[in-house]
């Protein structure tokens, strides 16, 4: 039998491979656990070009981190998929997987076979789903219950940004979604646009139920404010363009 492996690859078998995979999961957990919850610490990310990003959002951290280990990379992809489906729970997924790996390490040290540990995780998942089905509370017409929606949005946002900013932002997000939702149609989030005003503070964030065009006046004598005016929409450019002459 001939085995062809990259000369730079690390070849591990049996117990060594299990230990390395478990350590990778626990190492990713150690990185993520300090930013869990409303009192989590912010992380400063510095890019290759010197750009700085400060965040404690698990999705942003996992997206910006360069993860080389295959097991840690698989955990990162699973947590990212969680965020894409529900919009939250990235850090929680990494923490939960890390704790399961710690418990698995104890069981493996006692001589239990890894296959039995995996089967035990499958049984625990089924029991957890049964518990959630009996624990959950059905909500009728949740879309019209603004207070419940604001509580859900506030719970998610407070784990990512300061509470003073999260509370008004949560209300703005809920009102924006309720504004564009049409009965009997799928929700199109492309109808909500986020504009970044660099000359404003984050505490001045607000929802505008309409169209915002951040272009400014074309002349100093033009009025700053108009009411009950007509709006022309066209798909041609009204700016002066130099004509091209091909001789």
Image (cartoon, rainbow, N blue to C red):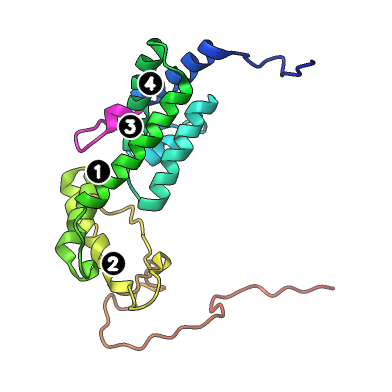
The residue that label 3 is drawn on is: 96
Which circle's residue, 3 or 4, is located before the other in the chain? 3
Kindly state the secondary structure of the residue where label 2 is placed: helix
Left or right: 112 in relation to 142: right
Q: Residue at x 41, y 15 (%)?
A: 108
| Labels 3 and 1 touching (C-beta < 8 A) | no
Q: Which mark is residue 104?
A: 4
The answer to which of 66 and 3 lies nearer the viewer is: 3
The residue that label 1 is drawn on is: 161
Near mark 1 (Cα within 10 A), the count class, few <14, some 14-19 or many ≥20, is some
The residue that label 2 is drawn on is: 176
Kindly state the secondary structure of the residue where label 4 is placed: helix
| x, y percent for residue 138 | 21, 61
| x, y percent for residue 158 | 21, 45
- Find the magenta span and give its range: 31-42
Left or right: 167 in relation to 120: left
Task: Tell me if residue 22 comes above or below residue 183 in the rendering.
Answer: above
The answer to which of 119 and 191 lies nearer the viewer is: 119
């Amino acid at each position: 039998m001939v085995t062809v492996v990259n000369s730079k690859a690390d070849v591990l078998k049996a117990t060594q491979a299990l230990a390395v995979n478990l350590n990778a999961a626990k190492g990713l957990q150690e990185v993520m656990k300090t930013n869990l919850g409303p009192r989590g610490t912010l992380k400063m990310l510095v890019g290759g070009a010197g750009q700085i990003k400060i965040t404690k959002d698990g999705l942003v951290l996992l997206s910006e981190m360069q993860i080389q280990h295959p097991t840690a990379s698989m955990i990162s992809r699973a947590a990212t998929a969680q965020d894409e489906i529900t919009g939250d729970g990235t850090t929680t997924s990494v923490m939960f997987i890390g704790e399961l790996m710690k418990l698995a390490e104890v069981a493996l040290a006692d001589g239990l076979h890894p296959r039995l540990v995996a089967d035990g995780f499958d049984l625990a998942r089924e029991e957890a789903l049964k518990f959630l089905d009996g624990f959950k509370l059905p909500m009728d017409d949740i879309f019209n219950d603004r207070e419940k929606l604001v509580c859900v949005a506030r719970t998610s946002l407070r784990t990512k940004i300061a509470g003073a900013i999260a509370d008004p932002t949560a209300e703005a997000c809920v009102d924006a979604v309720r504004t564009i939702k049409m009965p009997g149609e799928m929700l199109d989030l492309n109808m909500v646009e986020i504009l970044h005003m660099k000359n404003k503070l984050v505490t001045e964030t607000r929802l505008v139920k309409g169209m915002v065009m951040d272009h400014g006046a074309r002349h100093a004598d033009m009025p700053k404010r108009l009411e009950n005016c007509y709006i022309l929409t066209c798909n041609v450019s009204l700016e002066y363009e130099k004509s091209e002459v091909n001789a």
